[in-house]
Amino acid sequence: MTHNPQPLHVDADFAAKSEFGRILVNGTFTFSLMVGLSVADTTMGTLIANLGYDKLIMPRPVHLGDTLHAVTEVVEVRESKSRPEAGIVTFRHELINQRDEVVCQCLRAALIKRSPT
């Protein structure tokens, strides 16, 4: 899906001989999955635009067959200086595997519609 032909992601024999011992899920797919899992709980119906992602880390590998879930925390909320109908929300997203290990984390800034006053 990411068009990344790195053998660690597509060649079981190659990956078996690596330090990881088996195929790894591509990091950009992992990141995208984490953000996608968060949308229903965070920005569905309120998002104007994603403004950027920061401090993306992948401290542990993801393997085929892992069970993952996403957790999101709002870390900052502020008014938009240029758009009075919107605010900027910064989220910390974490993707966690079945062993309760964080496998991906980032900060995400989003321009969000404000509630009517």
Image: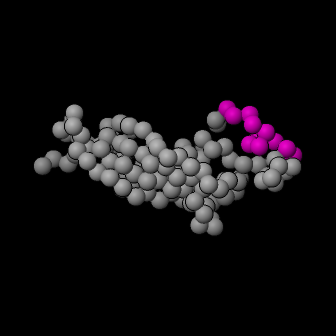
The furthest residue to the front: 55
On the picture, is 32 further left or further right than 87? right
User: Image point 71% across, 53% down: which residue?
Assistant: 64
The furthest residue to the left: 117
Residue 23 percent coordinates (x, y): 76, 49
Quarter occupied by residue 79: top left
Residue 14 percent coordinates (x, y): 85, 44
Residue 46 percent coordinates (x, y): 30, 44
User: Image point 32% across, 52% down: which residue?
Assistant: 76
Residue 21 in the magenta stretch? The answer is no
Q: Quadrant of the N terminus?
A: top right
Quarter occupied by residue 75: bottom left
On the picture, is 21 further left or further right than 72? right
Q: Is residue 82 visible?
A: yes
On the picture, is 62 further left or further right than 42? right
State which region is magenta.
3-14
Q: Is residue 77 above or below residue 99?
A: above
